[in-house]
Image (tube, grey):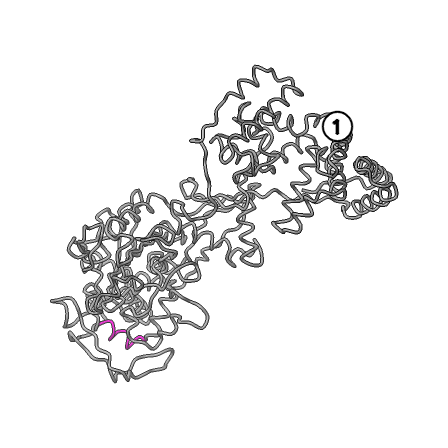
């Protein structure tokens, strides 16, 4: 807000006279020699007037930002100063009276500067031999608090704003007079009650009421109001949590002032003085994500808010974090607590936080990119046993780790590339052996390029009874026939399969400049079998792109964003774009739906009338993993269970024994994933999607039909 001061020359001269006279009174009380007095007053008055601009700029008060889940429940609060600004009609009359009674009982009777109080303070300062304070009106105290806020923690600035000297006093008087020339007494009182510090981390009367009494400022009674009002003079030494005796003494001082100056009856004061302080009602609110219900979701959202995606908040991360901590933002996330809790409970029922493996699940809405759930087997943020600092769903730049191998789920990218080139699901056959060595064979590269594989590279089909013979794209996917997919990839191109993965939205876990990217796999035949470590979130997005008929929506977690005044701020967009031809997506959906209902995924099918499609994936090397990605036309969920390469228990296993489906798991009483009827990560996918699909329409995939004339 901007407080406009009178600009006339007459007003300026009058102002100078007032502050000079008042400064003279203060200084005279110290017995300063006349010459020094005259010079000091003149210099101080001139400096004060020179330093104050014609328009006094008073910034908005720092206010906590709140982050909500999709159901409206609060997930986290962010603040430098825990404050929630409330209007005067939201503050009880008892609180207003108590603060005025102890700080400035003649507030509504005098102007910005109270000459009576200054004279009284001057006499007291003279007796004490220095300028120790006193005599400041509530308006002047508000000015001081504003100046402190404008320091933004700068030590030199804070010292200057609190310096016990005449320059500071005169400057505060000048500002106070300017304020009262434009603001009403009620407006100043409102601002004061919101900016004042009430100790123990509570800034402003609403935060204080919530912290100490678990009520709103509107509901403060006489005793509570008196206790809060008494804290302000020395908040570090008189709050009832840390200094209960001092708090009671200060409350008594407030009540005595109200009896003396405001006509409060002694009976009312005595009753308030007898009230106890109920420490069980104290509410402590931490700033940030640690300790919240979903700390990694919170952390991911806060990283988005401080990233380059939100340049409207500032030019760098520090500036954007200042906005998050001070601007009173209202942030609503896309996370659905029902789906999130289902995902978390499903994972936690199988994989424990201290187990040698990690489980991760992510659910997104295909047509919007909204993240509905983001769960992991180590849900607690910290450094203790079973805790972590990593969000295993996302890439390194957003707080993630190394990523995971999703195995044969990558065959989908080769299928899409093949259909794009006119190799259709029911008519594209290869006759394959159980084990084949691809050394010396020519593979299609990028464009018209070809490359011959010089190294020995053997692949084996894993499903007994379906490990050799003639397969087309549908049966090859149903039974995950490795040699079918390497054959198809050889002809359509590794580069083209990689391109489809990128188009769908898949991202490598550490896309740091100079490090690996998906493009690095353009000439690596094992790509179709899942050679790249990618993020679980991006795999949900990638498969969801097919469910959305080739329109990719980037994952977003912020549904809405408003400033303290209720003005909407644009949140990062999903930037939905048609990146894959709809007919290609229809073909992929046809293949993966058959896999889900009649192939290796059939045990995960949910008979609810909603079309579903999926693919399993495994990795059998030292980075052993079991993955599953499945989707409907509306939502997509990826799940991966993988060995923790940082776990001593995992590292101690011989490489040939690192199979996540046979690792003892704590929630299963030492039993294994495989022994409990969960042959792959699909056993986790099914219960998550059952909850996620509740109440959803019975959506169907578009029927696949091979284009004519091709």
Q: Residue at x 66, y 51 (%)?
A: 156
Q: Nearer the viewer, residue 478 or 277?
A: 277
Q: Position of residue 35 (x, y in %)?
A: 88, 43
Q: Which residues are magenta?
A: 484-493
Q: Is residue 633 visible?
A: no
Q: Verify whether residue 343 appears in magenta.
A: no
Q: Nearer the viewer, residue 234 or 592?
A: 234
Q: What quarter of the picture does the C terminus occupy? A: bottom left
Q: Residue at x 74, y 43 (%)?
A: 165
Circle 1 SS class: loop
Q: Position of residue 168 (x, y in %)?
A: 73, 43
Q: Position of residue 383 (x, y in %)?
A: 37, 54
Q: Residue at x 75, y 37 (%)?
A: 129
Residue closest to the far right: 35
Q: Nearer the viewer, residue 230 or 566?
A: 230
Residue located beneath label 1 in the image: 110
Tell me which corner region of the image, top left, top right, bottom left or bottom right, holds residue 30.
top right
């Amino acid at each position: 807000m901007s407080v406009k001061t009178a600009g006339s020359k007459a007003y300026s001269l009058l102002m100078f006279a007032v502050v000079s006279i008042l400064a003279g009174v203060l200084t005279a009380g110290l017995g300063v020699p006349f010459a020094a007095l005259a010079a000091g007053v003149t210099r101080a008055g001139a400096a004060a007037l020179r330093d104050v601009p014609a328009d006094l700029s008073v910034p908005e008060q720092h206010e906590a930002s709140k982050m909500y889940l999709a159901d409206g429940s609060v997930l986290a609060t962010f603040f430098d100063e825990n404050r929630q600004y409330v209007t005067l009609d939201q503050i009880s009359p008892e609180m207003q009276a108590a603060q005025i009674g102890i700080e400035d009982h003649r507030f509504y009777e005098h102007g910005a500067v109270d000459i009576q109080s200054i004279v009284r303070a001057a006499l007291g300062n003279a007796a004490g031999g220095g300028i120790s304070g006193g005599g400041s009106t509530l308006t002047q105290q508000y000015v001081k608090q504003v100046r402190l806020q404008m320091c933004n923690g700068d030590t030199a600035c804070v010292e200057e704003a609190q310096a016990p000297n005449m320059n500071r006093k005169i400057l505060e008087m000048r500002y106070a007079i300017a304020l009262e020339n434009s603001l009403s007494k009620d407006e100043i009182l409102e601002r004061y009650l919101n900016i004042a510090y009430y100790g123990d981390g509570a800034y402003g009367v609403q935060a204080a009421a919530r912290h100490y009494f678990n009520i709103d400022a509107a509901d403060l009674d006489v005793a509570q109001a008196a206790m809060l009002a008494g804290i302000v003079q020395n908040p570090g030494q008189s709050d009832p949590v840390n200094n209960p005796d001092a708090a009671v003494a200060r409350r008594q001082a407030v009540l005595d002032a109200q009896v003396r100056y405001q006509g409060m009856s002694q009976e009312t004061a005595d009753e308030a003085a007898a009230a106890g302080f109920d420490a069980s009602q104290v509410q402590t609110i931490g700033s940030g994500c640690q300790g919240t219900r979903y700390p990694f979701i919170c952390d991911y959202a806060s990283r988005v808010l401080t990233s380059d995606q939100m340049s409207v908040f500032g030019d760098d991360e520090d500036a954007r974090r200042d906005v998050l901590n001070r601007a009173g933002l209202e942030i609503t996330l896309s996370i659905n607590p029902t789906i999130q809790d289902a995902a978390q409970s499903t994972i936690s029922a199988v994989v424990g936080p201290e187990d040698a493996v990690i489980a991760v699940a992510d659910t997104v809405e295909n047509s919007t990119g909204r993240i509905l759930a983001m769960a992991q087997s180590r849900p607690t943020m910290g450094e203790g046993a079973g805790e972590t600092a990593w969000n295993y769903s996302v890439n390194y730049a957003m707080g993630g780790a190394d990523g995971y191998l999703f195995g044969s789920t990558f065959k989908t990218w080769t299928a899409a590339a093949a259909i794009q080139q006119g190799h259709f699901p029911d008519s594209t056959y290869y006759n394959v052996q159980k084990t084949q060595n691809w050394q010396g064979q020519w593979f299609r590269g990028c464009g018209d390029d070809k490359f011959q594989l010089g190294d020995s590279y053997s692949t084996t089909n894993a499903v007994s009874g379906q490990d050799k013979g003639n397969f087309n794209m549908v049966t090859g996917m149903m039974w995950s026939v490795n040699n079918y997919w390497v054959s198809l990839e050889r002809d359509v191109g590794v580069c083209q399969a990689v391109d489809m993965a990128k188009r769908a939205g898949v991202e490598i876990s550490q896309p740091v400049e100079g490090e690996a990217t998906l493009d690095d796999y353009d000439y690596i035949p094992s790509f179709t079998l899942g050679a790249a470590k990618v993020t679980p979130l991006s795999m949900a997005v990638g498969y969801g792109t097919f469910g959305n008929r080739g329109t990719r929506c980037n994952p977003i977690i912020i549904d809405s964003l408003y400033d303290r005044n209720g003005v909407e701020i644009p949140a990062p967009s999903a930037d939905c774009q048609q990146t894959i031809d709809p007919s290609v997506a229809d073909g992929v959906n046809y293949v993966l739906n058959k896999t889900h209902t009649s192939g290796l995924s059939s045990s995960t099918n949910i008979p609810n009338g909603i079309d579903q499609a999926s693919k399993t994936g495994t990795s059998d090397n030292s980075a052993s993993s079991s993955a599953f990605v499945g989707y409907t036309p509306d939502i997509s969920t990826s799940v991966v269970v993988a060995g923790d390469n940082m776990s001593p228990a995992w590292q101690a296993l011989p490489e040939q024994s690192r199979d996540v489906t046979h690792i003892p798991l704590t929630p299963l009483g030492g039993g294994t994933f495989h022994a409990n009827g969960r042959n792959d990560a699909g056993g986790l996918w099914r219960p998550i999607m059952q909850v996620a699909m509740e109440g959803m329409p019975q959506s169907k995939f578009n029927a696949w039909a091979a284009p004519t004339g091709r």
